[in-house]
Amino acid sequence: MALNEKQQEHLHNLRHSLAHILAAAITRLYDNVKFGTGPVTEQGFFYDIDMTHRLAPEDLKRIEKEMRKIIRADYPFERSELTTKEAKERFSELNQSYKVELIEGLENEGTKEVSLYQTGEFVDLCRGGHVSRSSEIPEDCFSLTRIAGAYWKSDEKREQLQRITGIAFASKADLDAYETMLKEAEKRDHRKLGKELDLFTFSDLVGPGLPLWTPKGTTFRTILDEFVWTLRKAKAYEKVTIPHITKKALYETSGHWKKFSEELFKVGTREGKEYALKPMNCPHHTQIFDHLPRSYRHMPQRYAETTMVYRDEQSGELGGLTRVLSITQDDAHVFCRTNQIKEEFFAVWDIIDAFYTTFGFTFETVRLSFHDPKTPEKYLGDESIWKKAEDMLQEIAKERHVPFVEAPGEAALYGPKIDFIAKDSIGREHQVATIQLDMNLPEQFDLSCTNEEGKSERIVMIHCAIMGSLERFIAVLIEHYAGAFPLWLSPIQIAVLPLSEKFLDYAQTVTQKLKDQGIRVELHNENDSLGKRIREAQKQKIPAMLILGEKEVSDQTVTLRRRDKEEQNVLTLDALIKGLQKEIQSRA
C-alpha cells in the first residue's frame, strides 16, 4: 500500500533513528570504533564502521539484541547546534576522524554551524529527523541483514570500512511481508534462473559485466525487440544504424566529453587519434537528422535502433544483467517542432502502455525527473530552457490523467524525463521505460528546420526507450515470471516426447510440421523414462509438451500437456497448430 507524505516522513525518521541506535549498540559492544556515515536506504538503513574486530554474520544477532535494549531504555533523541569549530573539537576528542573530515568538507562549502543528535551516551553528526524517543520504535520492526565492505566516500584509494545493513518498516507485519517477498525474490533470482534456463552466461576470459547470450537467450531478446518494433512501426518510426565508435569531436559538441568522460571507454588509433565507444546513441542520430536540409513538411523525423552502448562502470557495481558494461538499448529519437511535442509524447506513451500491459505490469504513478537548480553544473543548458521543458512535462502528465511525483535531481544530462515505475508480480517496483524532452542537444548541434514562413526554426528532440536496457528488463522479466514465460515469449514453446524409439519417426514428423508453422519446438528423445523427460521439460519451464505413443501414431493425433497441469488433451495436429498460433498471436 502506498504511504502518504506523513507516513513516509515517519518511516524515514524511524529508519534514521535505527541507524543511530545501531551505531550506539556497536559502541557498547566493541572498542576503538570509528564511524563513517549511516544514512536511510530505500528499505532500511546502514552504517559504515571502522574497527579492528572483523564482523561475522553471527555478530548481527548480538548487535540486534543490544539495539533492543537501547530502544527499551527510552532515550530521547536530543538535538544540539554547534559551530563547525566546536563540532570538530568534540569529535576530535571522541577520536572520530571521519566525522571531522565530514565537518571540514561542510566548512569548505561555507557551512558555519552543524547539528548533533545524542541518544543515551552516543552522539552523532546529523541533520535529522528522528523519532522523539527510542521507545517509539517497535522492537520487532527491524532486522540486520548483511555485512559488506565499503570504501570511505566510495573511493577505492581510501580506507575500507565494514558496512552493516538493516531493513526496517513501520510494523512487524510490514517487516514480515517484506521478508516473505525477499524469500520469493531469491527463488526468482534472474542469475540463477538464467543459468538453469540456458539464456545467458558469463566468461572470465571475456570479463565481468559482458553477458554472452545463448541461442535460447538470443531468441528471447529477439522476440521482445520485434514486439517493440511492431508497436513503433505502427507509429511511423523508421530504422537507422550507426557505428559503435565516434571521434572525440562528436562528444565534445554534445557535452558528453566534459560531463560524462569518466564513463567513456576511450580508443586510440595508430595515428594518434582519440575515439570513444558510444555510451548512448543520440549524438550519432543528430547527424542523421542533420545530413539533409529539413523543412516543416519533413517533421517529425522518427528514428529507432536497437544497439549496444558501453559504459565504464566500476567492477564492484556490476551484477548479473542489472548492471553491465555492454548495454543493449531499444533506443529511439524523435526530431520535431515544439507544437508537435505533446502528440509525439502521447504516441510513445501509447506504446509503453501497450507493451507493459501485455506482461501484466501496472503503473500506479510516473516520475517526473527534473534537474536540481542547486547543481546547474551537472546539466547542459540554462535555467530558462529547463523550466520550459519541465513545465511542458507537467502539462503532458496532467492531460494523461496519471498520478505523478516530481524528483528533482533525477533528470538526464540534457533534459527532464518521464520515468515509468512498474510493479512486478511480487510487488517490487522497477524503473523501466522513459521519455525525455531535450531542448539542449538541438542547441549544441544547431538543429533546425525551415518553417512555413521560410525562416529557420529550432527543433526539439524526444528520447524514448521502451525497455531501456534489454539486459536489465530481461532480468526484471525473468523474475516477474519466475522463468515460466507465457507461450508467445518462451524460447522453446513445445517439447515433443515420444514414448519410445518406436515412435521417433512420427515425433520427427510432428516436430518438423510445427517448425514449418513457425512454432519453436524441441524433440526430447533421450533414452530416459517418460516421467523423467516430463520433469526435465517442466524444469526448463517449457509451456507445453506433446506426448506421442501408439494411439497417437494410429489416430494421427497428439496428446497435449501444459506446463503446470496434470490433465491432457488429445488433438489433431492441425487443431493443435491452429490453437497455438491463435494463443501466440494474442500474446496471452
Image (tube, grey):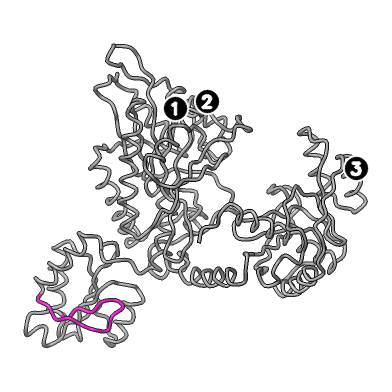
> Mark 1 belongs to which amino acid?
Met
Magenta region includes residue 569: yes
519, 184: nearer the viewer: 184
**Residue 48 visible within the image:** yes
Q: Of callouts 3 and 2, which one flags the residue occurring earlier in the amino acid sequence?
A: 3
> Disc 3 on helix, strand or loop?
helix
Tell me if residue 11 comes above or below residue 407 in the rendering.
below
Q: Contact, CB < 8 Å: mark 1 with mark 3?
A: no
**What is the residue that sits farthest to the left in this orientation?**
555
152, 42: nearer the viewer: 42
The answer to whether residue 323 is left or right of residue 564 is right
Residue at which label 3 appears? 86
Residue at 41% x, 53% y is: 363
Residue at 52% x, 55% y is: 208
Magenta region includes residue 398: no
Q: Of callouts 1 and 3, which one flags the residue occurring earlier in the amino acid sequence?
A: 3
Q: Residues within 10 Å of mark 3 (few under 14, many from 20)?
A: few
Residue at which label 2 appears? 381
> Mark 2 belongs to which amino acid?
Gly
> Disc 1 on helix, strand or loop?
loop
In the rendering, at what x and y percent does residue 266 appear? Answer: 52, 37
In the rendering, at what x and y percent does residue 405 appear? Answer: 50, 45
Q: Contact, CB < 8 Å: mark 2 with mark 1?
A: yes
